[in-house]
Image (cartoon, grey):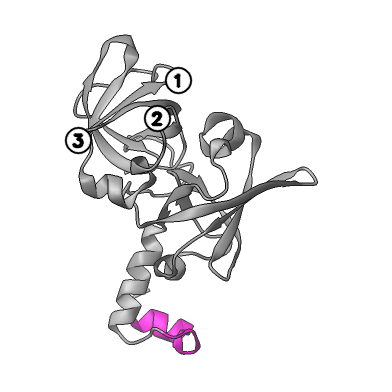
Amino acid sequence: MFTGLIENTAAIKTRGNGKLILVPRKEFSGGVKPGDSIAINGCCLTLERTLPGGMLEFHVLDETLNRTNLGSLPLGAKVNMERAMQISARLDGHIVTGHIDCTGKMMNIIKKSSDIIATISFPEELQPFLISKGCIAVDGISLTPVLVENGVFTIHLIPVTLGETALPERRNGDLINLEGDLLAKYVQHQLSGMDYGTKNDLTMETLRNAGW
């Protein structure tokens, strides 16, 4: 499990033949070792080995490269990194599994007054798990959707997100990894199995009957 709070960024050094080699921007506090689970742009990968110069090598499946932006980002592109959470740590973000649901596309990043606002498109399959003021992992970053409508959502970026993650490097049309809220997935699954799938049918009574 992860929290969506990015610890580090890295540049893609090489990719191919099932290998992904990254050059971290800085060393991880406490270090990393082979076998560690590390979320790369929100994708849970296992560290295969450490290389000279601090480089890190991961094994990546074709499925991972095809379903996430790790297969389309160019060499040298920056990615976000987060080690698996410790059970004793604060959950400052939200519960992130590291299993990407789908990719969206960066539409634009604009400045409005003192806010930096990013607009990202998303496929219909993510709609049940995406609500305003909810939780979304964007390239592994725990963020809050503000506006959700017509297949796009907006997020407001704080200075820490701008300065410590790879998100500001994304350009219009770039693929973005998206993971919906885990709790929303379980709620939707249970309600759909009890035929409470429409908005008009969803009441406090039906939620209680469904065990919520």
Q: Which residue is mark 1?
A: 25
- Label 2 to label 1, Cα distance in Å? 15 Å
Residue with the mark numbered 3: 18
Mark 2–mark 1 CB contact (< 8 Å): no
The numbered mark, 3 or 1, whose residue comes first in the sequence reads 3
Q: Which mark is drawn over residue 1?
A: none
The mark nearer the N terminus, 3 or 2, is 3
- Where disc 3 sits, the SS reads loop
Say which quarter of the image contains residue 85. top left
* Res. 136 visible in picture: yes
Secondary structure mostly seen in magenta is helix
Q: Which mark is residue 75?
A: 2
* Amino acid type of the residue tagged 3 in the rendering: Gly
Query: What is the three-letter code of the residue carrying label 2?
Result: Leu
- Residue at (40, 40) in percent of width and height: 41
Question: Is 25 situated above or below 170?
Answer: above
Of the image marks 2 and 1, the number of the one nearer the N terminus: 1
The amino acid pointed to by label 1 is Arg
In reply to whether residue 114 is colored magenta, the answer given is no
Q: Nearer the viewer, residue 124 or 6?
A: 124
Residue 15 placement (x, y as % from top left): 29, 31
**Residue 117 shows in this picture:** no
For mark 1, give the secondary structure. Answer: loop
Query: For residue 120, which quarter of the picture?
Result: bottom right
